């Protein structure tokens, strides 16, 4: 049975400052680097064989730290990037106008093809994240991969694997350097295909980790 681990990157400067990142980027904070080392130790104990990461800076840095702990390299996959949040990227979360907030709400309320201008829809995000997950089938038999990605991207992936609409991702708290696991199984009794074993585990972190509300 293929088990795939999913990690959200460590805390960044803009996470802490409550600024929208999307496919823009900011560096890991000192705490984010520390979180990455902690999840790296957890990954080493799990016998991770492959680390595959979004090509944005914050995920690449997190992946490098994890891969060092596991004694493997890092493979980049742009399909694991965060949702493209268009014209609102780099903006403080609390600075949005009523119109801008209305754009963002179309991502949260299930509006068909809802998106921020110049951004990506959750359906488009879900499709590419599933492609990146299914690419793990091409790894050698017995591999134990770990994917490094982002809050909305991983929330959409996990939610849609559960059969929920993509916008349910707002109800899943995936904190910085949280660990999730999905398994692909052939059990006739449970659901065929991908099942969610763990979502948002932070038991390996000894300091509180930020979520989307920076709590
Ligand atoms: O700021 C964003 O784009 C998202 O809310 C969180 O993105 P991240 O998981 O890449 O920090």
Image (cartoon, rainbow, N blue to C red):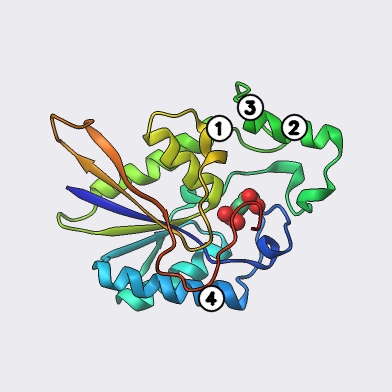
In which quadrant of the rendered view does residue 160 lie?
Answer: top left
Asked whether the residues under the numbered discs 3 and 1 touch, taking CB atoms below 8 Å apart as contact, a structural biologist would say yes
**Cα distance, mark 2 to mark 3?**
11 Å
**Cα distance, mark 4 to mark 1?**
30 Å
The answer to whether residue 105 is above or below residue 75 is above
Question: Which badge, 4 or 3, comes first in the chain's sequence?
Answer: 4
Asked whether the residues under the numbered discs 2 and 4 touch, taking CB atoms below 8 Å apart as contact, a structural biologist would say no
Q: Residue, x 59% and y 25% (percent of image)?
A: 110
What SS does tag 2 mark? helix
Asked whether the residues under the numbered discs 2 and 1 touch, taking CB atoms below 8 Å apart as contact, a structural biologist would say no
Residue underneath mark 4? 33
Does residue 171 appear left or right of residue 37 in this picture? right
**Cα distance, mark 2 to mark 1?**
14 Å
Asked whether the residues under the numbered discs 4 and 1 touch, taking CB atoms below 8 Å apart as contact, a structural biologist would say no
Does residue 149 appear left or right of residue 24 in this picture? left
Looking at the image, is mark 2 or mark 1 nearer the viewer?
A: 1
The answer to whether residue 49 is above or below residue 65 is above
Question: Which badge, 2 or 4, comes first in the chain's sequence?
Answer: 4
In which quadrant of the rendered view does residue 191 lie?
Answer: top left
Q: Residue, x 76% and y 50% (percent of image)?
A: 93
Of residue 106 and residue 68, the one placed in the foreground of this image is 106
Looking at the image, is mark 4 or mark 3 nearer the viewer?
A: 3
Residue 184 x, y percent position in the rendering: 23, 42
Residue underneath mark 3? 109
Looking at the image, is mark 2 or mark 3 nearer the viewer?
A: 3
Question: Which badge, 2 or 1, comes first in the chain's sequence?
Answer: 2
**Cα distance, mark 3 to mark 1?**
7 Å
What SS does tag 3 mark? loop
Task: Estimate how packed mark 4 is, as few (under 14), some (14 to 19) or many (20 or more) residues with alpha carbons within 10 Å.
Answer: many
Does residue 142 appear left or right of residue 194 in this picture? left
């Amino acid at each position: 049975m293929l088990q795939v681990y999913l990690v959200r990157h460590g805390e960044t400067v803009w996470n802490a400052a409550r600024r929208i990142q999307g496919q823009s980027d900011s560096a890991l904070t000192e705490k984010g680097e520390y979180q990455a080392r902690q999840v790296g130790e957890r990954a080493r104990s799990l016998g991770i064989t492959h680390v595959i990461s979004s090509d944005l800076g914050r995920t690449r840095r997190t992946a490098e730290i994890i891969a060092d702990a596991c004694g493997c390299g890092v493979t980049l996959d742009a399909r694991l990037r965060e949702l493209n949040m268009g014209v609102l990227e780099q903006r403080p979360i609390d600075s949005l106008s009523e119109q801008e907030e209305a754009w963002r709400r179309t991502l949260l309320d299930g509006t068909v093809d809802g998106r921020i201008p110049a951004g990506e829809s959750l359906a488009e995000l879900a499709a590419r994240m599933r492609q990146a997950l299914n690419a793990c089938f091409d790894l050698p038999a017995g591999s134990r991969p770990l994917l490094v990605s982002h809050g909305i991207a991983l929330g959409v992936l996990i939610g849609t694997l559960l059969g929920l609409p993509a916008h349910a991702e707002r109800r899943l708290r995936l904190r910085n350097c949280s660990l999730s696991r999905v398994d692909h199984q052939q059990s006739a009794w449970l659901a065929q295909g991908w099942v969610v074993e763990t979502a948002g585990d932070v038991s390996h972190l000894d300091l509180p980790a930020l979520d989307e509300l920076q709590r």
